[in-house]
Image (tube, helix red, strand yellow):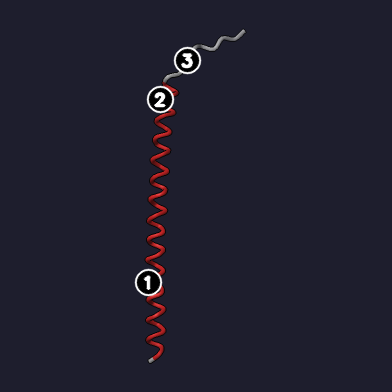
Amino acid sequence: MIWVVVVGALALAGVVALVIHAVSLGHKAADVKAEVTVLNERRAELRTLLGQLERTPAQRD
């Protein structure tokens, strides 16, 4: 009968590990989403700055 307790404890430990891993992955996904948002903002800023440049034809001597 002790094996039932051992297997149950192992199963419970496995479920706890899965939950902890899922929460960790959720946090990592949120961090990646935040970084992508920052990159999109930087891309928009860069596009604005590049739009302000005046293009003059290159002259060769």
Residue ID for mark 2: 48
User: What amino acid is labelled 2 in the image?
Assistant: Thr
Label 2, label 1: how many angstroms apart (C-alpha)? 50 Å
Position in image of residue 11 (x %, y %): 38, 77
* Disc sitting over residue 15 in the figure: 1
Q: Classify mark 2: helix, strand or loop.
A: helix
Q: Which image quarter is the N terminus in?
A: bottom left
Position in image of residue 25 (x %, y %): 40, 57
Q: Classify mark 3: helix, strand or loop.
A: loop
Q: In the rendered structure, are the residues bearing label 3 and label 2 in contact, judged by CB atoms less than 8 Å apart?
A: no
Residue at the right extreme, as displayed: 61
Q: Earlier in the sequence, mark 2 or mark 1?
A: 1
At x 39%, y 54%, the residue is 27
User: What amino acid is labelled 1 in the image?
Assistant: Val
Judge the density around disc 1: few (<14), some (14-19), many (≥20) Cα neighbours within 10 Å: few
Q: Classify mark 1: helix, strand or loop.
A: helix
Position in image of residue 3 (x %, y %): 41, 88
Q: Is residue 60 left or right of residue 51?
A: right
* Disc sitting over residue 55 in the figure: 3
Residue toward you, 60 or 52:
52
Q: Earlier in the sequence, mark 3 or mark 2?
A: 2
Q: Nearer the viewer, mark 3 or mark 2?
A: 2
User: What amino acid is labelled 3 in the image?
Assistant: Arg
Residue 53's place in the image compared with 32, above or below, is: above
